[in-house]
Amino acid sequence: MVYDGVIVESGCVGGGACHQSPAGNSKRGLADSMMAYMGLVDAAAMGMNLPGSMATANCAGTGTVRVKPSDPDNSLLIQKLEDKQKCGIAMPPGGLIDADKIAIVRNWIKAGAKTD
């Protein structure tokens, strides 16, 4: 699955500012594939990852969706991976994901963000 190979295994769950750390809100549970899927697909965007950061704005209440199936350009995940987000901060911190992996995520979303 895309979210196993790219999202779960590519560092989204490691480091001090990532999603399994206290700063990254471990409630999202991105280390588990199904919880990652449920927390991303058709899920409303929430607050910023890093309290006190210089991010443009908190995403909560904006109507932004983390992963909007079949619509990568309007999916916050792609916007953040490409550093084109209107709220929150780019991911991962420092821009450590390569273009090939972003393309895999983009194509997965474009194909409907399915679980298989």
Image (cartoon, helix red, strand yellow):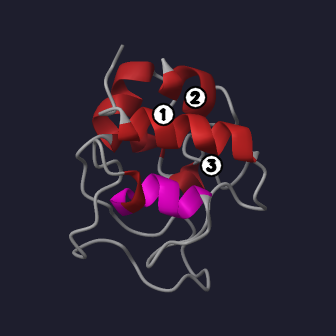
Dot 1 or dot 2: first in sequence order is: 2
Badge 1 amino acid: Leu
Q: Residue at x 49, y 28 (%)?
A: 3
Q: Residue at x 56, y 50 (%)?
A: 22
Mark seen at residue 8: 2
In this view, the residue farthest toward the top is 116
Q: CA distance from mark 1 to mark 2?
A: 6 Å
Mark seen at residue 52: none
Q: In front: 39, or 110? A: 110
Q: In front: 24, or 70? A: 70
Dot 3 or dot 1: first in sequence order is: 3
Where residue 7 sits: x, y (%)?
A: 56, 34
Disc 3 on helix, strand or loop?
loop
Residue for badge 1: 30
Query: What number of labels is visible?
Result: 3
Where residue 98 sits: x, y (%)?
A: 76, 45
- Badge 1 density bin: few <14, some 14–19, many ≥20, Cα 10 Å: many
Mark seen at residue 18: 3
Up-down relation of residue 34 to residue 48 (above or below)? above
77 in magenta: yes
- Quadrant (top left/top right/bottom left/bottom right) for the C terminus: top left
Q: Magenta part of the protein: which range?
A: 74-81
Where residue 13 sits: x, y (%)?
A: 62, 37
Dot 3 or dot 2: first in sequence order is: 2
Q: Are marks 3 and 1 in contact (CB under 8 Å)?
A: no
Q: Are marks 1 and 2 in contact (CB under 8 Å)?
A: yes
